[in-house]
């Protein structure tokens, strides 16, 4: 046997290790993709809840709906899976309403928490200028 010849027994099992490493990498990439998709869904839900809550609060502030504008905004936000974080009224007669809501981020596969605990949504609504 020459010095340049490769001993086939020294290479046994290296394919298995490479395949296991590739599978582990794919699992990590799939988990990262799933976390990104969950966060994206939570951000969309927060945005939608903030928009709807702001519209309802603005309608109540203008007298088109009965009730307290911020109380109504909180109800609408809860119905859409969000929690009202802040409600501010300003403008002429308080007819313009700024709403901040938060939607909790789900745990990744029920085990790992994201560094952020919630997705936030903000909206403003009021009468036309």
Image (cartoon, rainbow, N blue to C red):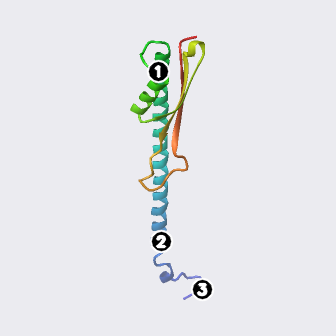
Where residue 89 sits, quadrant-wise, is: top right
* Above or below: residue 117 compared with residue 99: below
Residue 79, how many percent across, how many down?
39, 31
Label 2 crowd bin: few (<14), some (14–19), many (20+), radius 10 Å = few
- Can residue 54 be seen by looking at this rendering? no
Would residue 74 be visible to someone looking at this image?
Answer: yes
- Residue at (52, 83) in percent of width and height: 7
Mark 2 or 1 closer to N-term? Answer: 2
Residue 61: x percent and y percent?
Answer: 50, 16
Residue closer to the observer: 54 or 48: 54
Real-space CA distance between mark 1 and mark 3, rounded to the nearest whole angstrom: 88 Å
- The N terminus lies in quadrant: bottom right
- Locate residue 19, reporting x and y percent: 45, 67
**Of the residues tagged 2 and 1, which is closer to the observer?**
1
- Res 76 quadrant in image: top left
Quick one: label 3, few (<14), some, or many (20+) residues within 10 Å?
Answer: few
- Element carrying mark 3: loop
Q: Which-is-in-front pick, marks 1 and 3? A: 1
Name the residue carrying label 3.
Answer: 3
Tell me which numbered mark, 2 or 3, is placed earlier along the sequence: 3
**Up-down: is 117 above or below 65?**
below
Residue at figure coordinates x 44%, y 30% from the top left: 77
Q: Identify the residue at horizontal 49%, vertical 54% (top origin).
A: 29
Q: What's the mark number on residue 17?
A: 2
Labels 1 & 3 near each other (Cβ < 8 A): no
Q: Is residue 72 above or below residue 81?
A: above
Viewer-closest of 53 and 94: 94
Q: Position of residue 66 (x, y in %)?
A: 41, 16
Which numbered disc covers residue 68?
1
């Amino acid at each position: 046997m020459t010095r340049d010849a490769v001993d086939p027994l020294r290479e046994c099992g290296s394919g298995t290790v490479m395949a296991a490493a590739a599978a582990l990498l794919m699992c990590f990439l799939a988990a990262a993709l799933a976390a990104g998709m969950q966060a994206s869904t939570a951000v969309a839900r927060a945005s939608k809840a903030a928009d709807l809550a702001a519209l309802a609060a603005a309608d109540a502030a203008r007298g088109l709906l009965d009730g307290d504008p911020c109380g109504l905004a909180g109800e609408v936000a809860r119905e859409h899976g969000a929690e009202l974080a802040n409600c501010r009224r300003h403008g002429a007669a308080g007819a313009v309403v700024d709403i901040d809501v938060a939607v909790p981020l789900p745990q990744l596969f029920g085990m790992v928490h994201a560094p952020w605990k919630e997705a936030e949504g903000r909206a403003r609504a009021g009468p036309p200028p």
